[in-house]
Amino acid sequence: MTATPAAAPTWPRPRGLLLDAMGTLIGLRSPVGATYAAVAAEHGIDVAPAAIDRAFPGVLRQAPPLAFPGLEGDRLLEAERGWWGKRIDAVLAAAGGSDAPAPTALHHALFDRFADPSLWRVYPDVPAVLRRWHGAGLRLAVVSNFDRRLQPLLEGLGLAYLFATVVVSSSAGAAKPSPQPFRIALESLGLSASQVWHVGDSPEDGAGARAAGVRCLLVRRP
């Protein structure tokens, strides 16, 4: 992983690291459009993968936070599915599909499909780096704007054992750039903001870490 800022070596050595997931540790094996188009076709909706890929980033940028204060259990799962269902409808409409909501069965099929670890890959540099940090005694945690699918994904990808905790925005009740997910991770690790660094890949990572008083390194991936 290549990270900034260059001044980072002058920082005090951390006792723990908070890490973003998507775009930092893991990514999709194939573009999101290919999976959306294939599953949509199974439900009678014809849409081009390239059109979905063009629409998807803008839909996510305009979406409300993937965060549900006070919800847990089945109510949280229902909220997560509902949030993604609205994004699916918006992506399909923007990609040239129908403006009518997609069938609930399609929403659920896509939600479940992206819970499959086989769709995801660990970036090649990640396992050795994480094992080195873990072996050096650093406490590691994930802080991600995602939902409860992340923990089993990390288990399926062989990374979960390296993390003391996994904090996702949906159950944290707030999404980066809010400092709340960082504070939950710090409390779980038993460390102060001055004792950890955050490693991420987005402006939200940097802003959220700063708001929590945590130093941040941003990864630059090709």
Image (tube, grey):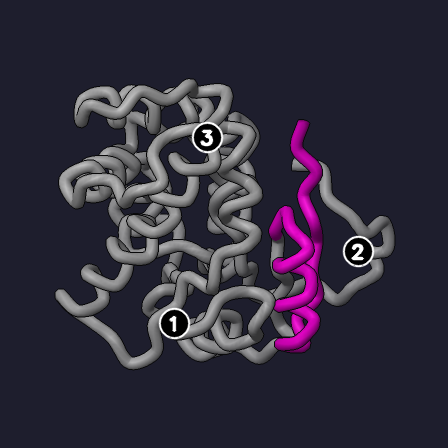
Report the front residue among 128 and 105.
105
The image position of residue 58, as x and y in percent, is 57, 44
Amino acid on which disc 3 is placed = Ala
**Residue visible at 51% across and 30% down?**
123
Do residues under tags 2 and 3 come within 8 Å of each other at their CB atoms? no
Can see residue 68?
yes
Determine the image quadrant of residue 88.
top left
Against 144, is 195 above or below? below
- Circle 3 Cα neighbour tier, 10 Å, few/some/many (<14 / 14–19 / ≥20): many
Picture disc at residue 95: 3
Q: Which residue is mark 2?
A: 8
Picture disc at residue 45: none
User: Where does the N terminus fall, quadrant-wise?
Assistant: top right
Q: Which residue is mark 1?
A: 172
Name the N-terminal-most of marks 3 and 1. 3
**Spatial separation of the CA atoms under disc 1 and disc 2:** 28 Å
Between disc 2 and disc 3, the foreground one is 3
> Which residues are drawn in magenta?
200-222
User: Where does the C terminus fall, quadrant-wise?
Assistant: top right
